[in-house]
Each structure stands twice: as C-alpha cells, then as structure tokens.
C-alpha cells in the first residue's frame, strides 16, 4: 500500500530560501541521510555566503565575539550526527524533481517562519524568518545559538528596516552598503558600464532595459552605476539607485512600486524582470501595479532600469509601444573566459572567508575553463561562480586529503565538482590531451573493427580542430556516413563521443524520419512564444544548449523536410541556430554526423569495383541532395561490408562485454574458440553486419546463462566454461 505524500509549495518560500533548501538536499545526500533535518538546513545556511541568514550570523560572530569556525564545526557535527526524525509524509521537490522527506522540525520552522512573514505583511518565508524559529527551545538547532547569546529578539533587532520590515520598503543599492554579494560586484565590465552610463545620460528616453540570460551579470551593471554615483562619476543628475524589494513586491505590488518610485525621485529605480509588469491580461501583477510602473516610463522624474531575458523581452516588452518609444535596450552577453577568471579572482577572498579554506590561484583558471567547456546550462559568470561554490562545499564536506592539504582547494577538487555536475569523468578532464589525440585512431579502433577510412577521416578533422586549424564559427566537422546496416556507423559515433567528451551521453541522436513534415521544424527548434509547445523547447536546440560539446547524429538525413534541412544547412555553414525562444545556440564545438541510405544498393553490390561504386553513389547523392549541402560536407565517408574476420573480431569484443557483466556478479566466464566459431556459424545474415551477433549472444549465452545461475546458484569466484555440445552450448563450472 502506498501512502500519499504532500508536497511543500515553493510559493511560500523566497527564492533565496528555496535555493538554500536545494543546497541542504545536496549535503543531506552526501551524508546518506534519508530525511532533511533542521540542523541540515542550518548547515546549508553556513555554506551559502550570499544568504541573508549567513550574513546575519557572521555579523553576530563579530558583535558577540565568538569563533566562526568553531560555530560552523558544531553545526556540521549536529547535522551529521542527528538521526532522522519520524516521517511526517511531507516532501520538498528539488529542481531535478527529486522528492526529499522533511522532518517534523523542518515543517515547524517553515510553517512558523511563514506565519511570522504573514504577520509582517510578507507573502513568503525567508532565510531570516527560518533563522528566528531555529532559536526556539523546541528546535534542535537552539543550542549553538543559545550558548552564544543569539536570541529571537536580537535577530529581529539586527534585521529591522530590511527584510523583516512591517511595510513595503525598497532597498538602496549603493556600493558602500551592498545588500548582497554578487559575482561581478567587484570586477566591472568597463565597456558595458560605460555604455549604460551613456544611455542614462541622454536627455530623452533615458529608461534602459538590460536584456540577457539569467546569470550574465545584469544586476552587477546596475551596482556598478550605483558605485559610480557614490564616487561622483555617475550619469548627470542622478543621485541614487533604489531596488524594489522582491518580498514586499510579492506581498503588495502596488504599494511597493509606489514606495520605490517615491524613494527614487531624482535617481534610478531598479526593477528586475520588468516583463512581469507588461503583457496585458498575461501580466504577473494586478492592473494598478502594472499601470503605476508603466506610467513611470512616460516621465523622467525617476529613471527605470529593468531586466529581461531575450525570450521575455520578445514576448512582452518589444510589443509595448509605450516602452519602445521611451526606453533604450542594452544587451548583456555572457562574460568571456578571461573576464570570468578575473571575476573569480576578485571573489576569491569572499569564498575563502566564507568557507574557511584557501584557494589555489590555478583552481580559478581551471574552474573557468572547465565550466565553459562542460557546464553550459547557465552562462558565464554565473555558472563559474556556482561551480566554485560546489567545489568549496565538497571540499568542506568530503575532506579525504592529507591533513596538510585539507583546507586548500586545488584543480583536482574543481574537476571532481565538474564531474558531479556533468557526469563527465574527472580523469578525462585531467588526462594528457596531447597524447590522447596523437593516439586517437588507435583509441577508436579499440571499439571499431575495420572501417579504417572512416576512422582516419574523422580523426584527421578532429585533430585539426583541436589545434585550432578550423573555422572557429563552424562545427568541428560535418560528415555524411554511407554504408549498409550493422557495419559500425552508430558505434563510431558513440566511440567518438566517448573519446572527445568522456561519455556516450554526449551523443545526440535524431531520427530524421520524425521530421518529414514542414511543421516539425517547431519540434526541431522549439515553438515561438505564444504557440503550443513553446515551453517544451526544441529537441535539437535544447539538447545542444545543455551539451554544446556533443556529437550529433542525424539518422536517415535524406528524409528531413525542406525547412528542417534548411536549419541543418545553417548549422553546417554558420555554426549556430536561433531557437523558438529567441536564444542563439552555438554548434561550433559539435561534430555533425549524418547517415543516408542514398546509393546503398551500390555499396553492397559485390559485382562493382570500388571506383564504379563511388561514381554511382555520387551521382545518386547529387540527384537527391542540393549542391549547397554536398559542398558544406567536410567528407563523405564510406563504410564497407564486414568480412568474416571482422565479424569474428566484433564477436570477441561483444563477448568481452559479457565477461564484464559476469564479473560484476563475481563470476568468471570462459568461452572457448570453438564456441565462438559455433556462434558465428549460427549467423544466417552476415550481410546485416554486426547486428545479428548481439541477438545470437542474447539467445545462446545470456538467456540460458540466466537460467543456469538461477538453477545452480554457483558460488562467487568460480569459472563457468561455455562449450559446444551437439546443437547447443553447455555451461559447466570449471
């Protein structure tokens, strides 16, 4: 019988508290805990330097004169030692859709914290609200606070006028008193800052919308302007920068907008995600709040700086004549690798103080390089900052180094963190790449039997790209695979993905027979805003956005519709596509592989010599494909039918995989040469290549082996011989 479990609503949590719960989930899983406890959440607070609860506790450590490291170690011990409480049938759902059980005390903290928020006209529970409940006698986290004199009253006193204000209150964003540490608050992008200051200095339409992905540093540009204003170097006539309070905005949007506009008279009002106030019936806030902000764009008494992603800008803001006529647009791209490294260098002291560790300078360069290559779900610099947090947290929670190195973050620690984020083996990142590429052909031939021409052609293109001898905008290579079924086309694609990126999951396979209709382009790239399926994204563009270092296999490419084919031509020529969401997806680090059955009858005709076969195949390709497609290919690669010797070698490789499966059960598998010859003799369709061999192994070895193990229950460590006996195989313990 399954018990229905209730789910915690993220709507009652501030974004910061929800993110801290995510971090608590990671810590919980690392400690093999089955339920999240109050101690685990407090530990997560101490692992989040940008969190308001962290900053408040650190302030207490100075004012009450207690040792921060000692406090942190005590909380860590409590979190590790505490057994999970009774199951209260309540879950928190993570971003990865995992369901995490919450202890009874966790529910008390979140429920009563939300009650405090409600009493103060707030609509969401924050980390500070949760911290207040953690100091109560009934909660296990009370002791670290009580012995150091931290009480509910002191927390309320320290937080007055900020998040716990009883009325809507916007925040002043000045460099002297920053409200929150942000990735680029110290290292400013000079060209963008100067451009923003220039836009704010013109006499008409001074309002500005910053457009860019989440994590590119739009907020930090506003903080840069705030700092320039405090130094007397800001835009003419602007005296301050005021930021709307998100919690107050969610509680009473109209009152908060009015309060922000009042405070920002003669200055700037910063309104993140401005698209929430536009869109008519689709706007996120009530009409009066939207109208109040929209009216501000008609005036110059308060200058509005807003932000939006490209998709939200196109969907809502670009359609507002009022906004377009009275504001300027500044697009904010991700930082470069060089800029990102400088940002991490500027943040390094903050990380070291927050986590109580030292960070080797080369770790920052490694973090930037690896995150730019392997973790592109988020843009730079946000992705690099997140990776550094993960690496520092892992070092603190899983210290397995010599004592002398326990508190030092080195490049190896960063590689481990990237590996956990991306599933790319850490050993792959640290390997001697020069030697790997020199031996690329030999590496691929460990999995690919025969097909020398295909392996050499692919290796040549990849090596040229690796040393920079390719058009930086185009894909690494675009190849058309021709050949009969079962000769290794897909297997070579898998082997290539494993060689380049350390995992076969970097192979993206798209069956082009599913894209034969013109309207299938919407599934390929994603539907435009407002159309059915918009939220689902594009099957190609979303996959490459998540893994820009990929091998993409377009199977049976000749079946694609004209519109899909045109998009493929753009990828091959320009190395980029624009998704339905308006995002530009980069294909310059991808390898494009395509298969086709065009001319296949010539390739398997034994009566044709090689020159005639290729000539006839070329003619067939020219009749079907447009010249611009064939001209954009780096090479057309022919796969030859497999010889008997090839099939024998492939069978040996496949049987080696069976031996590994048995080894996982602590059993040894021994297959005689006569058994291999017998299996090959059962192959009635050698013209189908290697595919029948897998079915033969399934039928004659794997299925009867399962019955044998269940019936005989052989002890661990024994060797099972597989020999021919009449018309079948015999299994015997050696």
Image (cartoon, rainbow, N blue to C red):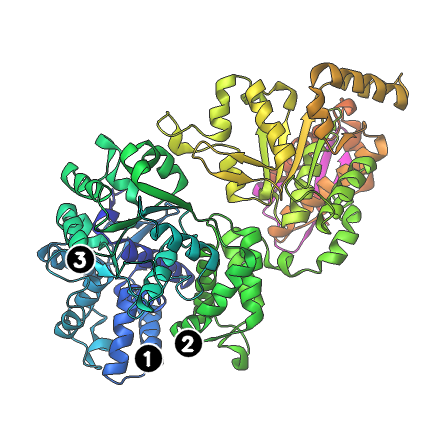
Q: Which residues are magenta?
A: 708-731
**Residue indicated by mark 3:** 263
The numbered mark at residue 68 is: 1
Q: Earlier in the sequence, mark 3 or mark 1?
A: 1
Q: Is residue 730 above or below residue 421?
A: above
Number of callouts: 3
Label 1 near label 2: C-beta < 8 Å? yes
- Cα distance in 3D space between marks 3 and 1: 37 Å
Q: Nearer the viewer, mark 3 or mark 2?
A: 3
Rendered location of residue 372, percent (x, y): 55, 53
Residue at 61%, 51% (x, y): give it. 664
Query: In terms of secondary structure, where does tag 3 sit?
Result: helix
**In which quadrant will I find the N terminus?**
top left
Q: Nearer the viewer, residue 414 or 655?
A: 414
Q: Say left or right for 335 vs 463.
A: left
Query: Which sits earlier in the primary sequence, circle 3 or circle 2?
Result: 3
- From the top left corner, tell me how far across and down residue 630 is, in percent: 72, 25
Q: Secondary structure at mark 1?
A: helix
Q: In the picture, residue 19 is in which quadrant? A: bottom left
Mark 2 is surrounded, within 10 Å at the Cα level, by few (under 14), some (14 to 19) or many (20 or more) other residues, namely: some
Vertical position of residue 635 compared to residue 658: above or below: above
Relative depth, front residue between 568 and 493: 568
Mark 2 / mark 1, whichever is N-terminal: 1
Residue lying furthest bottom: 65
In three-dimensional space, the C-alpha distance between marks 3 and 2, rounded to whole angstroms, equals 38 Å
């Amino acid at each position: 019988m399954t018990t229905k479990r209730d789910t915690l609503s993220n709507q009652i949590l501030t974004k910061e508290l929800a993110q801290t719960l995510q971090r608590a989930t990671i810590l919980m899983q690392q400690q093999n805990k089955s339920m999240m406890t109050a101690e685990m959440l407090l530990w997560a607070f101490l692992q989040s330097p940008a969190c308001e609860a962290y900053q408040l506790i650190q302030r207490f450590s100075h004012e009450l004169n207690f040792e921060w490291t000692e406090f942190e170690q005590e909380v860590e011990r409590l979190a590790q030692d505490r057994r999970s409480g009774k199951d209260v049938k309540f879950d928190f759902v993570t971003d990865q859709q995992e369901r995490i059980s919450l202890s009874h005390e966790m529910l008390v903290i979140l429920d009563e914290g939300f009650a405090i928020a409600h009493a103060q006209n707030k609509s969401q529970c924050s980390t500070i609200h949760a911290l207040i409940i953690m100091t109560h006698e009934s909660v296990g986290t009370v002791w670290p606070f009580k012995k150091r004199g931290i009480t509910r009253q002191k927390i309320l006193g320290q937080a007055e006028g900020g998040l716990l204000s009883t009325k809507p209150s916007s925040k002043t964003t000045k460099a002297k008193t920053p409200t929150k540490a942000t990735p680029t608050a110290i290292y400013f992008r000079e060209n963008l800052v100067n451009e923003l200051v220039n836009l704010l200095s013109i006499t008409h339409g001074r309002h500005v919308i910053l457009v860019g992905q989440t994590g590119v540093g739009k907020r930090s540009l506003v903080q840069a302007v705030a700092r320039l204003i405090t130094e007397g170097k800001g835009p003419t006539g602007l005296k301050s920068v005021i930021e709307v309070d998100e919690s107050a905005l969610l509680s009473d949007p109209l009152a908060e907008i009015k309060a922000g506009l009042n405070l920002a008279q003669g200055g700037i009002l910063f309104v993140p995600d401005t698209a929430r106030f536009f869109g008519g019936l689709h706007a996120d806030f009530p009409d009066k709040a939207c109208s109040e902000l929209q009216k501000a764009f008609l005036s110059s008494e308060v200058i509005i700086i807003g932000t939006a992603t490209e998709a939200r800008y196109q969907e809502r803001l670009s359609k507002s004549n009022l906004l377009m006529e009275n504001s300027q647009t500044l697009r904010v791209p991700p930082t470069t690798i060089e800029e990102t490294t400088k940002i991490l260098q500027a943040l390094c002291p903050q990380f070291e103080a927050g986590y109580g560790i030292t960070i080797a300078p080369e770790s920052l360069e490694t973090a930037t390089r690896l995150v730019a290559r392997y973790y592109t779900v988020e843009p730079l610099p946000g992705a690099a900052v997140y990776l550094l947090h993960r690496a520092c947290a892992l070092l603190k929670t899983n210290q397995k180094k010599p004592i002398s190195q326990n508190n030092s973050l080195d490049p190896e620690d960063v590689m481990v963190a990237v590996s956990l984020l991306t599933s790319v083996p850490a050993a792959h990142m640290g390997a001697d790449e020069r030697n790997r590429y020199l031996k690329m052909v030999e590496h691929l031939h460990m999995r690919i039997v025969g097909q020398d021409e295909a392996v050499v052609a692919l290796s040549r293109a990849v090596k040229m790209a690796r040393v920079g001898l390719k058009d930086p905008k185009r894909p690494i290579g675009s190849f058309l695979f021709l050949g009969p079924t079962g000769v290794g086309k897909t297997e070579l694609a898998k082997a290539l993905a494993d060689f380049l990126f350390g995992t076969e999951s970097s192979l993206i396979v798209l069956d082009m027979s599913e894209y034969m209709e013109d309207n299938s382009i919407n599934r390929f790239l994603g539907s435009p805003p407002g159309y059915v399926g918009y939220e689902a994204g594009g099957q190609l563009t979303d996959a490459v956005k998540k893994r820009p270092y990929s091998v993409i296999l377009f199977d049976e490419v000749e079946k694609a519709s004209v519109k899909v084919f045109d998009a493929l031509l753009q990828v091959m020529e320009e190395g980029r596509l624009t998704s339905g969401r308006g995002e530009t997806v980069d294909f310059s680090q991808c390898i494009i592989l395509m298969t086709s059955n065009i001319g296949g009858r010539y390739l398997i005709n034994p009566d044709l010599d090689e020159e005639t076969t290729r000539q006839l195949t070329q003619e067939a390709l020219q009749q079907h494909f447009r010249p611009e497609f064939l001209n954009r290919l780096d090479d057309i690669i022919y796969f030859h039918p497999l010889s008997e010797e090839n099939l024998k070698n492939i069978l040996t490789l496949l049987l080696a995989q069976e031996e590994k499966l048995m080894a996982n059960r602590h059993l040894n598998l021994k297959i005689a040469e006569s058994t291999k010859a017998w299996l090959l003799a059962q192959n009635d369709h050698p013209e189908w290549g290697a595919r029948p061999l897998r079915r033969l192994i399934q039928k004659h070895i794997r299925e009867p082996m399962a019955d044998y193990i269940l019936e005989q229950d052989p002890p661990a460590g024994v060797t099972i011989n597989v020999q021919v006996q009449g018309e079948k195989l015999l299994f015997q313990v050696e």
